[in-house]
Image: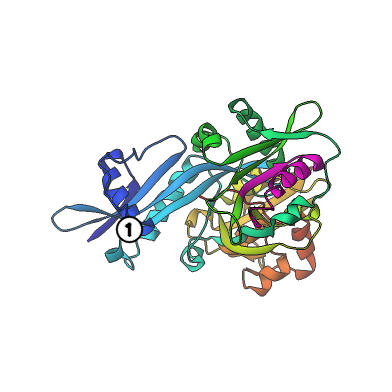
Amino acid sequence: MTVSARPLTDDDAEASRRLGWEAFGAPGTPPTEPPPPVAGEGRCWYGAFLTDDSGTERLSARMLDRYFETWIGGRRVPTAGIAGVTTAAEDRGRGLLSPLFGALLAGAHERGAVISSLFPTAPKIYRRFGYEVVGDLVEVEVPTAVLAAVDAPAGGSVRRAVAADVPAIFDCYGAWAATQHGPLTREGAAFASDRDGLLNDFTGVTVALDDHGTITGYALWDRGGEYGPGSSIKLEEVIATTPDAYRGLLRTLGSFASVTPAIKITTAGFDVIRSLLPALDWQVIKRSPYMINVIDIAGALTKRGYRYGFEAVLDFSVADHFLDACNGSYRLRVAGGRGRCERIRPEPEQRQFTARGLAALYAGALPVAELRAAGLLTGGDPATDSLWDGAFGAPALQIRDYF
C-alpha cells in the first residue's frame, strides 16, 4: 500500500460520507439523496488515500479545514479550524494522520491561515503536530431561580427577535468579540448558513434593547421537551454590551423558574454574567478542551495584537515543529499594541520553545515559568521571563463555537 493525501473532490463525496458515519454515527435508514458536495465556500475537505498494487485507491482518513478568523489581542488572525477527523477502523495505526495534516496545514498556510485550532477527542494524538490545550468550552448548570433573582435593569427592554434583527444580532456579537481574547469573528462563508438559519435553530432568540431601541444583547435558548424536576433550559449563548442588557436577558430566562429548575449555559473562561448572579451556583457539567497550533510563526506573531504601552524585543527559536519550515530562530519586536516578527540567525543559548510551548504562549494559556516547568521551553535567562509574560499574558480564551 502507498499513501497519498490531497483535497477531496465531489467524486469523493460518497466515500467521505460513509467514512463519517463510522466515526460519528450512521443513520438508521440509509439516505436516498446524494451526499452533499464536498467542495464549498469557507471550507476544504482533505483525504488520505491508500493505493494497492493494482492501482485501486481507497479513502482511509479525512479531515476538514474551516476558514475562520480568531480575535487575538484585538486583531483578526486567519485560522484553520480542524473538524471531522476520521480514520477507517481497519486503517488506524498506519500513520495516515501525518500526511493528512501535512497536506491540510500546507493548504491552509497557502490560503493565508497562520494558526490552527481544534477540539480534540484525545490531546496526545494532536500534540505531535504542534497543538496544545489552551482553554475549554464548558457547559455549566445554574438554578433558574438564581437568574430570576438578578437585579432588574435600570432601563431598556427585551423582546423576541424577528428576521430583521439578525444583522444587528451578529453586529452585537462582533462588537463583543472584538474586545475579547480567542472568539471567532463569525464572518465569511463559513458562517453564512448560521446567519440564514439563526431564528429557526433555537426555541427562542431574545434580544435586549436600550432606551433608543438599539439591540445591545441577545440570548439563544432551547426550551427542551420536559418540565418539572430534572428538566432544564439550554442557554446556548448570551452576549451583551451593557449591564442592563445582561440583566434583562438573564431575568427573562429566570422567569421559567416555576416550571424548569435548571439553566444550562454554554460559556468559557470567566463569564461576566457570574458577576451579575446573586448566588455562587455555577456547576461545570461538561468540558470540551480546545487546542491551537501556530502554523506560520512569523505571520501569526505579526498578525495578533499585544498590550498597549508595552515594548520589547524578544528573540527565540523553535526546533521540533511538525512543519519543518517553521523551525528556526526569530525576533519579535512589540510596540504600540502591534508586533513584527522576522527570521534571524540562531544565537548561542537562545530561548527555545517547543511547538506546543509556542502555542500555549501565543494563547496566553500559561505563564512562561510554567512552560519551563512543563518542558515546553528551555534556554534563555529566566530573569527576563516577565518580559514574555508582559507581551503575551492575556485573559482566558473566550471560546464560543464548537466545530
Instruction: Estimate the x, y position of residue 194 in percent, counting from the top left.
Output: 52, 37
Determine if the magenta segment contains residue 249.
yes
Is 387 left or right of 319, judged from the image as shown?
right
- Total count of labels: 1
385 relative to 160, above or below: below
Q: Nearer the viewer, residue 49 or 328?
A: 49
Is 115 left or right of 307, judged from the image as shown?
left
Instruction: Estimate the x, y position of residue 33 in percent, counting from the top left.
Output: 27, 39
| Residue at the (79%, 69%) spot, across then down | 383
* Image quadrant in which you'd find residue 353: bottom right
Instruction: Estimate the x, y position of residue 66 in percent, counting from the top left.
Output: 48, 44
Residue furthest out toward the left: 54
Q: Nearer the viewer, residue 344 or 66?
A: 66
Residue furthest out toward the right: 154
Q: Is residue 394 visible?
A: no
| Residue at the (40%, 36%) spot, across then down | 40
Q: Nearer the viewer, residue 11 or 273?
A: 273
| Residue at the (78%, 57%) spot, across then down | 390
* Image quadrant in which you'd find residue 11: top left
- The image's colouring method is rainbow
* Image quadrant in which you'd find residue 205: top right
Instruction: Estimate the x, y position of residue 211 in percent, counting from the top left.
Output: 81, 29
Determine if the magenta segment contains residue 356.
no
Q: Is residue 363 visible?
A: yes
Quadrant where the N terminus lies?
A: bottom left
Is 255 left or right of 167, judged from the image as shown?
right
The stretch of residues the image draws in magenta is 235-263
Is 375 left or right of 273, judged from the image as shown?
left
34 relative to 382, above or below: above
Mark 1: few, some, or many residues within 10 Å (few <14, many ≥20)? few
| Secondary element at tag 1 | helix
Residue that label 1 marks: 22
